Amino acid sequence: MTQICYEKLKEIFANHCHGVPMQSLQHCMHRIAERHLLSHNDLLPLRAIHDCYQPEELLQLLEKWALLSPSKIEILKQFYDSLQDYDASIHDSIEHYQQSICNTRTCPCLSLPSLSQQQQFLPRPSSSRNEYSDSHVRPQLPEYYSKIVDYLSEELGRRWLDVGRRLPGMRNFVRDLQDDAKLNTKTKIITMLEELYGSTGSSATTVLLEALSACRLNRLCDELLCLLPS
């Protein structure tokens, strides 16, 4: 089975849901909202659910509620199971995608560096990385993460600050980067992503995916997943 990206998985799921009455889909969303949102809100978002007329809009609502993201798709299984409309291919697609995510977490390439590796901070050869904050040390990065850094440094642009604010424990570091007038945007992105890996190790990719998804940068999420080792 070929690798499925996040957007493709949502497309497969939505296409299947097009064969289900919208009233049934909305009823499933009611139960999901009761299960996951009622403890945080006094009122259920019934209006938002009934304003959805396509399966794709319901998936967008799940993303808005932070129940669905490239690294968090268990809600799709719950949604599908509640439809009582079994189709093995849908389950296979969800499980295959979950397995591909799990592989990125258990792959030897993603394992935490050893103590001796953590003590080595090697500069990465790139003409765009000559300027750094004095307090930032550059960890030795695995090849796949170096590719992610290179890609996002070109594509993230002004949205880097939105993403950075959603990275756990990095708000102060990101604020200092923002205030550093000596660094250009690309260098700030590189510094932020290297700092993220230095503080979270092999969890950096998952944390980054969730931050990108929260900012609705789904295209970047898909490109990032393609850069991960298979």
Image: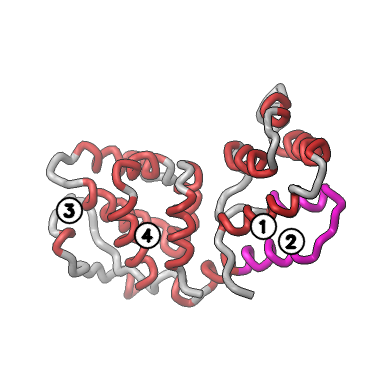
Q: Which residue is mark 1?
A: 12
Q: Which residue is mark 2?
A: 90
> Where residue 132 is drawn, which disc sits there?
3
Contact between labelled residues 2 and 1, with CB atoms less than 8 Å apart: yes
**Residue beneath the point at 32% across and 52% down:** 155
Closer mark to the observer between disc 1 and disc 2:
1
Residue type, label 1 = Ile
Magenta highlight: main SS = helix
Asked whether 100 falls inside the magenta stretch, the response is no
Residue type, label 3 = Tyr
Q: Disc 4 to disc 1, how far (Cα)?
A: 33 Å
Packing grade of label 3 (10 A; few <14, some 14-19, many >=20) is some
- Give the image's coloring scheme: secondary structure
Closer mark to the observer between disc 3 and disc 1:
1
Packing grade of label 1 (10 A; few <14, some 14-19, many >=20) is some
- Left-right relation of 65 to 178: right
Q: Disc 3 to disc 1, how far (Cα)?
A: 44 Å
Q: For the magenta stretch, what is the residue range?
A: 75-99
Can residue 114 be seen here? The reply is: yes
Q: Which residue is mark 4?
A: 197
Q: Quadrant of residue 44?
A: top right
- SS for dot 1: helix
Packing grade of label 2 (10 A; few <14, some 14-19, many >=20) is some
**Residue beneath the point at 60% across and 41% down:** 60
Q: Disc 1 to disc 2, how far (Cα)?
A: 8 Å
Residue 48 placement (x, y as % from top left): 67, 28
